[in-house]
Amino acid sequence: MSEQALNRSLDDFLRRHQNEAYAIALVSVKQPADALDVVQEAMLSFIKSYRLKPSSDWRPLFFRVLQNKVNDHHRRQKSWLRHFFSGHDQTDVAAEQASEAPSPLSALNIQDQGNEVIAAIQDLPSQQQQVILYRHWQELSVQETADVMQISPGSVKTHLFRATQKIKSLLGKSHA
């Protein structure tokens, strides 16, 4: 494949997956600007390290890089916050977005339900969040999720089960 064709293929691949990557990053880091930074870092690292790999391998590799960048962000954030702002609370982006503009009742109900699910996912431990995002939002297989997260397929299933039970419990409490 020529350099120009490779660049075009990479560009097409990244454009197709940028919104998905942003959604994963946003749920994980909770701040839109941070999510954009994480996605940009992931894309640059992916291009640098994996551009010459077969395109059939790009998707799991890209999401593995994204996972690493999310983890890096959390490590940096913890370190920074521990030194300067112990007890710092993150803004609930989903709640802010829900309150910005009025909409018809049906759209509002759908949005509220989506915000409840996102809030429930954000309350999960990090690995459970990622399993939910990769398995249900990205529709990666158990093995692909295990490869991306560098855990066993059995751990993927365990995290998915626990995450699902926790989300059902949290959503059940909000509707009781």
Image (cartoon, rainbow, N blue to C red):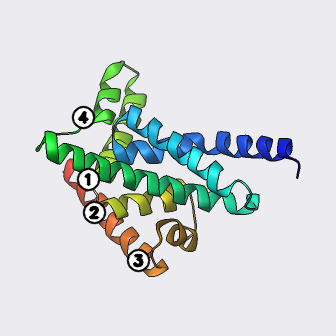
SS of the residue under disc 4: loop
Q: Earlier in the sequence, mark 2 or mark 4?
A: 4
Q: Which residue is mark 3?
A: 155
C-alpha gap between disc 2 and disc 4: 22 Å
36 or 139: nearer the viewer: 36
Residue 33, by quadrant, is top left
SS of the residue under disc 1: loop
Residue extending furthest left?
87
Residue 106 visible somewhere in the drawing: yes
Q: Which residue is mark 1?
A: 123
SS of the residue under disc 2: helix
C-alpha gap between disc 3 and disc 2: 16 Å
Q: Which residue is mark 4?
A: 91
The amino acid marked with disc number 3 is Ser
163 or 12: nearer the viewer: 12
Position of residue 139 in the picture relative to residue 55 (left or right): left
Q: Are marks 1 and 2 in contact (CB under 8 Å)?
A: yes
* Residue for point 66% across, 57% down: 50
* Residue for point 24% across, 60% down: 169
* Residue for point 70% across, 53% down: 51
Image x and y of residue 132, in percent = 43, 60
C-alpha gap between disc 4 and disc 1: 13 Å
The amino acid marked with disc number 1 is Asp
The amino acid marked with disc number 2 is Lys
Image x and y of residue 147, in percent = 54, 71
Foreground: disc 1 or disc 2: 1
The amino acid marked with disc number 4 is Thr
C-alpha gap between disc 3 and disc 1: 19 Å
